[in-house]
Image (cartoon, helix red, strand yellow):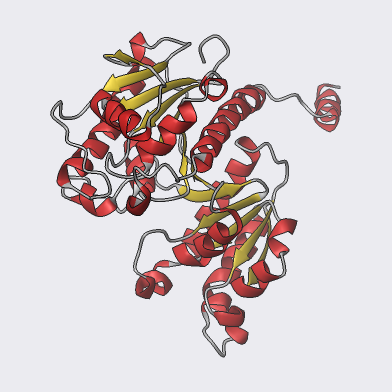
């Protein structure tokens, strides 16, 4: 932090998508941009293009070479990528994919300065990025690789709804083969740890969704619930977590059962994100749990059809910033307590008995 304010890197994502528009509209509000120290990893040329298209007077950006030069009371921009970048609004291009990759790489290069507290990523076009040498199905897998963790959890967040997925950007036909008791348990461990550390929830209650319709109907509609999901739930509870399920997804969300749990784990992408975006599309945030860094992103995609029209809501971007700030501060409070835990009364009495 600088002067008590959280420092957040913002990677530009696809320059032809909605990212710049929602970011600049949000940062044009001085009351919002002064809440933290913004460090955009992107293009001053793209900033100028979108400010002109949208008729925005601000924000003015402070162009710097790296995170060491940022100003705590300005919107900073680390110039990265091609100097002759051409913005083609609403069109996926190779140049757009290259620019998105360059911004991510530059952010991680600046991690060496230990100035940045977190990362907010603007939406990317995964197909365009593949041509740029980005060989990952999405941000989650890339971030796990860059931070050296074995696994991470895509956790969609909106107020009291926190929803993770066991499998992410994979074809639906491969889901049943990918889920195992070990994988489900690992995702539950990541969710449990994140709910406690990042969201300050003590003893979180988690729900697990089924894979098959009607939770398999006791094997009539599939046996993954009995052979794969239930063993994982039992193992999680044995390990001290509080986990219930498996629940059929339609009834679980239709009856509002998700409100009784601190976290929900879905088996595959659309099983979780369809109800999530129905409930909280405009204000949803994509958070990557299990990383040593704090990373959030708006829950929407590039939205090419809306670019330049001035009608896209910046609310999801704002919520991504708010959540990143909250999690950075939560970790700053909780981590020192975990490093130096206060012994319980019972532990103190037991120690005295051993000494006596």
Tell me which residue sits at (85%, 32%) in the image.
346
Left or right position of 151 against 215:
left
- Would you say residue 333 is visible in this rendering? yes
Left or right position of 67 against 128:
right
Q: Residue 127 is drawn in which quadrant?
A: bottom left
| Residue 115, percent from left and from top | 42, 16
Q: Work out which quarter of the rendered image holds the C terminus and state it.
A: top right
Is 62 situated above or below 261?
above
| Residue 283, percent from left and from top | 56, 46
Q: Foreground residue, 34 or 325?
A: 34
Q: Foreground residue, 146 or 51?
A: 51
Tell me which residue sits at (85%, 28%) in the image.
345
| Residue 264, percent from left and from top | 61, 58
Is 134 situated above or below 68?
below
- Residue at the outermost left position: 84
Tell me which residue sits at (27%, 23%) in the image.
44
- Would you say residue 132 is visible in this rendering? no
Left or right position of 282 against 91:
right
- Residue at the outermost front position: 55
| Residue 285, percent from left and from top | 52, 45
Q: Foreground residue, 63 or 152?
A: 63
Q: Foreground residue, 66 or 51?
A: 51
Total marks placed: 0
């Amino acid at each position: 932090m600088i002067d008590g304010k959280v420092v957040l890197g913002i990677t530009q994502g696809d320059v032809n998508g909605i990212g710049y528009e929602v970011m600049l509209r949000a940062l044009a509000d001085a009351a919002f941009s002064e809440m933290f120290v913004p460090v955009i990893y992107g293009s001053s040329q793209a900033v100028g293009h979108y400010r002109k298209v949208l008729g925005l007077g601000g924000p003015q950006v402070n162009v710097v070479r790296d995170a060491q030069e940022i100003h705590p009371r300005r919107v900073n921009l680390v110039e990265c990528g091609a100097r002759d970048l051409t913005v083609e609004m609403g069109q996926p291009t190779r140049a757009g994919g290259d620019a998105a990759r360059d911004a991510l790489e530059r952010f991680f290069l600046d991690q060496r300065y230990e100035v940045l507290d977190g990362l907010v990523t603007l939406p990317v076009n995964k197909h365009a990025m593949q041509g740029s040498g980005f060989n990952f199905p999405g941000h989650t897998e890339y971030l796990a690789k860059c931070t050296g963790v074995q696994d991470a959890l895509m956790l969609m967040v909106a107020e009291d709804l926190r929803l993770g997925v066991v499998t992410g950007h994979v074809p639906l036909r491969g889901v049943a083969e990918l889920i195992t008791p070990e994988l489900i348990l690992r995702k539950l461990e990541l969710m449990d740890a994140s709910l406690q550390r990042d969201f300050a929830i003590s003893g979180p209650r988690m729900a697990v969704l089924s894979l098959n319709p009607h939770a398999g109907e006791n094997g009539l509609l599939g046996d993954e619930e009995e052979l794969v999901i239930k063993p994982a739930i039992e193992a999680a509870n044995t390990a001290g977590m509080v986990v219930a399920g498996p629940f059929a997804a339609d009834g679980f969300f239709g009856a509002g059962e998700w409100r009784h749990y601190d976290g929900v784990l879905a088996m595959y992408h659309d099983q979780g994100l369809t109800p999530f975006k129905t409930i909280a599309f405009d204000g949803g945030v994509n958070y990557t749990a299990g990383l040593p860094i704090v990373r959030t992103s708006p829950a929407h995609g590039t939205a090419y059809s809306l670019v330049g029209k001035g009608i896209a809501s910046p609310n999801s971007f704002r919520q991504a910033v708010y959540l990143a700030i909250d999690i950075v501060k939560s970790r700053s409070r909780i981590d020192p307590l975990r490093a130096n835990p206060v012994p319980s009364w019972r532990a103190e009495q037991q120690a005295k008995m051993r000494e006596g």
